[in-house]
Image: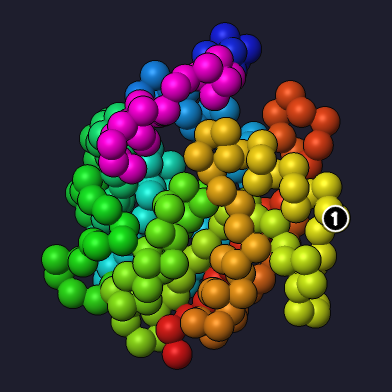
């Protein structure tokens, strides 16, 4: 762990050639070699996850989907509230990350948590509508993100809550009171993250606010490890009205 773990991740970020005919195959080639180091590095890169998960309304006996949930780290962030849930399904297209999640589930003895290898743009919960859907730094990695959000909207019960935290850039002229990023930010971050098939979008937040009743919207900057810059990210919580 520590520096050695970081170096392995940085090497894979810089030099792994992403290959595959499908989105799932490309995710697997990118994450397979770094799955074991994923959480340690991303804790310092993926800001706002703790705040988003802490703000979720998790009902007693509720059902939850964590879309693109990868290693299952978000389940830990629920803390004692995890036991309230009837079920938490972690869906992802990357087998290597889900294998790490399965280890986490077994290690913690979570009987109400399970993983599913599935496409967020087509997935339908097998036991009907859910109470909570989360996207934690997964929306920027889903090419048809709008379709994934439509599926999430359909999967939610009326009054159900969606929570999203992710990188983004603002529109050139965002509607007040939303933040306006500089020309440098709007050019640099999509280019920087695009190397790893992560695509910060100016349209996530406007889409979410048009489709859901806003409960919480924070626009922030978070430090990028080994880079003397801070990347824009947002936290959004909304309800299906």
Q: Is residue 231 above or below residue 229?
A: below
Q: Is residue 234 above or below residue 189?
A: below
Residue visible at 28% across and 68% down?
Answer: 63
Question: Residue 71: in sight, yes or no?
Answer: yes
Residue visible at 42% across and 52% down?
Answer: 142
Q: Position of residue 166 (x, y in %)?
A: 58, 53
Q: Is residue 28 left or right of residue 210?
A: left
Answer whether residue 25 is magenta in the image: yes
> Image quarter for residue 206?
bottom right
Residue visible at 78% across and 66% down?
Answer: 172
Question: Residue 81: in sight, yes or no?
Answer: no
> Image quarter for residue 71?
top left
Q: Is residue 92 above or below residue 100?
A: below
Q: Is residue 30 above or below residue 213?
A: above
Residue most toward the front? 21
Main SS of residues in magenta: helix
Q: Is residue 21 left or right of residue 235?
A: left
Circle 1 residue: 182
Task: Tell how many labels.
Answer: 1
Q: Position of residue 45 (x, y in %)?
A: 63, 37
Task: Give the crowd class for mark 1: few <14, some 14-19, many >=20 residues within 10 Å.
Answer: few
- Residue 219 vs residue 161, the one in the foreground: 219
Residue most toward the top? 4
- Residue 136 vs residue 61, the one in the foreground: 136
Residue visible at 37% across and 41% down?
Answer: 70
Q: Position of residue 41 (x, y in %)?
A: 57, 28
Q: Bounds of the magenta span?
A: 9-31
- Residue 204 vs residue 161, the one in the foreground: 204
Q: Position of residue 157 (x, y in %)?
A: 32, 82
Answer whether residue 24 is magenta in the image: yes
Quadrant containing the C terminus in the rendered view: bottom left
């Amino acid at each position: 762990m520590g520096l050695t773990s970081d170096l392995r991740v940085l090497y894979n970020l810089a030099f792994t050639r992403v290959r595959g005919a499908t989105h799932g195959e490309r995710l697997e080639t990118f994450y397979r070699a770094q799955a074991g180091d994923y959480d340690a590095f991303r804790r310092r890169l993926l800001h706002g996850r703790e705040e988003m998960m802490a703000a979720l309304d998790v009902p007693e006996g509720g059902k939850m989907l964590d879309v693109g949930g990868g290693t299952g780290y978000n389940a830990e962030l629920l803390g004692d509230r995890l036991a309230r849930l009837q079920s938490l399904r972690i869906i992802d297209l990357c087998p290597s990350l889900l294998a790490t999640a399965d280890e986490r589930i077994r290690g913690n003895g979570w009987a109400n948590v399970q993983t599913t290898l599935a496409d967020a743009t087509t997935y339908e919960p097998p036991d009907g509508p859910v109470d909570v859907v989360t996207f934690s730094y997964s929306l920027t990695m889903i090419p048809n993100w709008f379709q994934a959000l439509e599926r999430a909207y359909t999967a939610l019960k009326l009054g159900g809550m969606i929570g999203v935290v992710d990188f983004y850039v603002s529109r050139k002229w965002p509607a007040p009171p939303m933040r306006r990023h500089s020309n440098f930010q709007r050019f640099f971050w999509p280019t920087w993250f695009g190397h790893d098939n992560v695509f910060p979008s100016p349209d996530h937040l406007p889409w979410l606010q048009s489709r859901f009743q806003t409960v919480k919207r924070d626009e922030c900057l978070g430090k990028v490890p080994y880079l003397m810059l801070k990347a824009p990210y947002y936290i959004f919580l909304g309800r299906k009205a």
